[in-house]
Image (tube, helix red, strand yellow):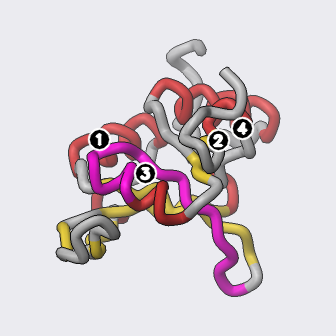
Amino acid sequence: MPSHLPSIADDREHDRRTVRLRALNRSADAREFAKRREGMIHAMDGGLWLHRHIWMGKPMVHLVSTDRARLLDYGTALGVPARRLQFKPLRDPRTTVRVDAWHWDLGGPVYPPHDAALRVDHDGITSVR
């Protein structure tokens, strides 16, 4: 992409922004899981977990990880300020121990497009590569 483009977060051209979001999620190796527990484990191991949900009637994604630096790199690439990164310790489902974790709220213009290449099925295999 040309360097004169606005940040992804500020890009007003919907189709271009969608392409850029998809590319960012793929290059960041973000993953979306069929089972919440598997996504949580991925995040506990330092991976980037795209967790879709509805908040106040609107679709939203939490991008969750215990690797704060990876999340900050993602935020920089997206064009959102570091102060928006949220801290929330989470319980590791394997040990029940609380672990420091962080997440980005991604909604509205930065709502990640659905991408089968990022989806991991219940058997741990990515749906499409």
Q: Earlier in the sequence, mark 2 or mark 3?
A: 3
Span highlighted in magenta in the image: 41-56
From the top left corner, tell me how far across and down residue 124 is, in percent.
54, 40
Up-down relation of residue 125 to residue 113 (above or below): above
From the top left corner, tell me how far across and down residue 29 is, in percent.
46, 31
Residue of label 1: 70
* Three-letter code, disc 2: Arg
| Residue appearing at x 81%, y 34% in the figure | 15
Q: Earlier in the sequence, mark 1 or mark 4?
A: 1
Q: Secondary structure at mark 2?
A: strand
- Tell me, yes or no, whether the two marked residues, 1 and 4, touch with CB atoms within 8 Å: no
Q: CA distance from mark 3 to mark 4?
A: 22 Å
From the top left corner, tell me how far across and down residue 118 is, in percent.
61, 36
* Quarter of the rendering containing residue 121: top right
* Three-letter code, disc 1: Arg
- Tell me, yes or no, whether the two marked residues, 2 and 4, touch with CB atoms within 8 Å: yes
Q: CA distance from mark 3 to mark 1?
A: 14 Å
Q: Is residue 10 visible?
A: no
Residue of label 3: 80
- Tell me, yes or no, whether the two marked residues, 3 and 1, touch with CB atoms within 8 Å: no
Q: Earlier in the sequence, mark 3 or mark 4?
A: 3
Q: CA distance from mark 2 to mark 4?
A: 7 Å
Q: Secondary structure at mark 4?
A: loop
- Return the mark for residue 119: 2
Judge depth for marks 1 and 4 and give the one in front: 4
